[in-house]
């Protein structure tokens, strides 16, 4: 009784499309995509900064 079958999900999606229209879904999809891209870019930038800090620390240790 409490489980959703694929038919239930299709019905929910169809009702949501009728209520909100396709333009809202495309806008939401675009926003999610941009959010994921921004998150990945921030993670990459953070990793590069940490790698740079480790490199600087090792260079300072070698000078000592």
Image: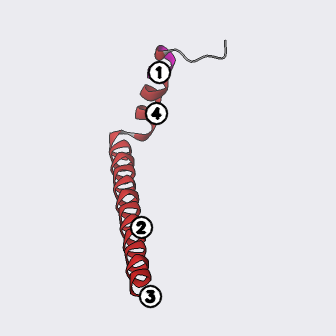
Secondary structure beneath label 1: helix
Rendered location of residue 10, percent (x, y): 44, 21
Q: Is residue 40 above or below residue 57?
A: above
Res 46 label = 2
Between discs 4 and 3, the one toward the N terminus: 4
Res 16 label = 4
Q: Is residue 24 above or below residue 64?
A: above
Rendered location of residue 12, percent (x, y): 49, 26
Between discs 2 and 1, the one toward the N terminus: 1
Res 64 label = 3
Secondary structure beneath label 2: helix
The one nearer the camera, 51 or 40, is 51
Quarter of the picture containing the C terminus is bottom left
Secondary structure beneath label 3: loop
Between discs 1 and 4, the one toward the N terminus: 1
Q: Which residue is mark 1?
A: 11
Task: Report the magenta residues as a range.
Answer: 7-11
Q: Residues within 10 Å of mark 3 (few under 14, many from 20)?
A: few
Marks 1 and 3 close (CB-CB < 8 Å): no
The one nearer the camera, 28 or 52, is 52
Quarter of the picture containing the N terminus is top right
Between discs 3 and 2, the one toward the N terminus: 2
- Residue 46 lies in quadrant: bottom left
């Amino acid at each position: 009784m409490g489980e959703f079958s694929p038919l239930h999900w299709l019905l929910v999606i169809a009702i949501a499309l009728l209520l909100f229209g396709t333009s809202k879904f495309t806008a939401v999809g675009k926003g999610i995509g941009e959010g994921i891209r921004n998150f990945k870019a921030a993670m990459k930038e953070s990793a590069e900064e940490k790698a740079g800090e480790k490199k600087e620390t090792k260079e300072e240790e070698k000078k000592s």
